[in-house]
Amino acid sequence: MNNENVEKEQKRALITSSLGLSAQSASTMLLSFVLSSMMITYHISGAAGGLISTITNIGMLVGGIFFGPLADKYGRVKIYSITTILYALATGLMAFSPNIFIIYILRFIVGIGGGGVYGVIMSMVADVYPQNKRGRINSYVTVAGQIGSIIAAIAAAIIIPMSGWRGLFLFGAIPIILGIFVYYKVPESSEWKKSQEKEESNSAAILSILFKKGNIGNTLRLMVMAIVQVAGYFGLMNWLPSILQEKSGLSVSGSSIWMIATIVGMSLGMLVFGQIMDRIGPKVAYSLFLLASAVSVFLYSFANNEFSLLMGGAIVGFFANGMNAGYGAIVGDLYETKIRATANNIIFNIGRAVGGFSAVVIGYLLDNFNLTITMGFLAMLYIISFFTVLTLNLNKRSENNE
């Protein structure tokens, strides 16, 4: 393939992946802006409301396991389109739900679609970009995911006052258009087509490659890293705004400013991490960011004024979530094209399913201990991930790689 065609494939993959992760992030985030209103509508408890998020995470794990091998076998574009339409349609149908049980079912489907599309998005990029560019390209895609969260917040501010929470979920159906467009207009990459010419594999065979000798060590280590990554994100973003309001008298608007500062820090961290990863390698990049995350998270518990809270939040976000930019790239490096979507989906969705419980653990620690102990717990998770990174085998890809 000549350089012009390669560049065309790369540009197409970057745009498609960025739009996909932005849409998926926005769809997932919509719930956080309407949960309290839904609880009033359906007359349910906080536990019943919180179950919606738990069901979503379980759906993501199921979707990752189911759609990952299908994307490797039948094509990135097909599964990207199907999963995008699936989560968008289920989101839109939530606007018409008569009771909380239908919400549970639809949100589970949202999780299946969202969890299924993640690995496809990351694999699209890894398939067409060389190893020395994957870090920075993945950082652009993950920043697009942050933009999706901002879009969800803006949509909530505009739509909820006019149409309520049901109107917001109708807005969440818009990515159906994206799924249909990609299905008909975006071709599969030449790299994926080449991988299909080598051998025919069924979904079970594709799945088994992740855990065979030569791959199982890296697969399990990356799962530990993903669990820590998700646990840190859920812990920081779910609990810190309310903690800050209680500890420092920060208003709701003040905590919103904190959220914006933290998201800006996260986005900058992703861009910087991608550059560092491509220049000095993933093991060094992750080691630096994990150690910095452990230190900054622990020190953040001693912040005692509004300026230090805002700046500290941006710094913590920079390091703790900046690393998120590297997972698609590192999986692209370690696993061959024919199992890349499966690896991305299973590794990161197991991280979501297990790491999501950090919100429960942190709630318990806050109830029974103090903020320093709680942040110390998060810091220890980053230290565990640091030692895990040191044992990753990054010197060579799996023995079956191209």
Image (tube, helix red, strand yellow):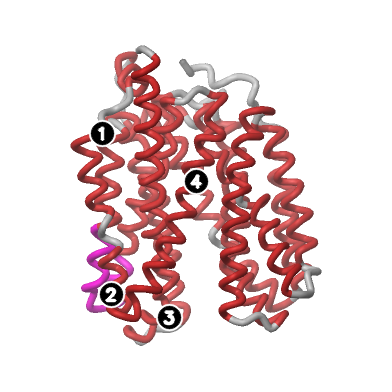
Q: Earlier in the sequence, mark 3 or mark 2?
A: 3
Between the C-alphas of marks 1 and 2, the distance is: 32 Å
Residue 94 part of the magenta segment: yes
User: Residue 204 location in percent, x, y?
Assistant: 35, 32
Tag 3, which secondary structure? helix
Q: Name the amino acid type tagged 2.
A: Arg
**For mark 1, what is the residue?**
186
**For mark 2, what is the residue?**
166
Between the C-alphas of marks 3 and 2, the distance is: 13 Å
Q: Earlier in the sequence, mark 1 or mark 2?
A: 2
Q: Name the amino acid type tagged 1.
A: Val
Q: Name the amino acid type tagged 3.
A: Ser
**Residue at position x 81%, y 69% from top?**
302
Q: Is residue 142 left or right of residue 248?
A: left
Q: Residues within 10 Å of mark 4 (few under 14, many from 20)?
A: many
Residue 217 versus residue 147 in the image, above or below? above
Q: Main secondary structure of the magenta part?
A: helix
Residue 4 part of the magenta segment: no
Q: Residues within 10 Å of mark 2 (few under 14, many from 20)?
A: many
**For mark 3, what is the residue?**
36
333 or 55, which lies in front?
A: 333
Q: Which of the numbered marks, if any, corresponds to residue 142? A: 4
Q: Earlier in the sequence, mark 3 or mark 1?
A: 3
User: Residue 26 location in percent, x, y?
Assistant: 40, 59
Q: Report the magenta residues as a range.
A: 89-105
Q: Earlier in the sequence, mark 2 or mark 4?
A: 4
Between the C-alphas of marks 1 and 4, the distance is: 21 Å
Comparing labels 3 and 1, the label whose residue is closer to the camera: 1
Q: Name the amino acid type tagged 4.
A: Thr
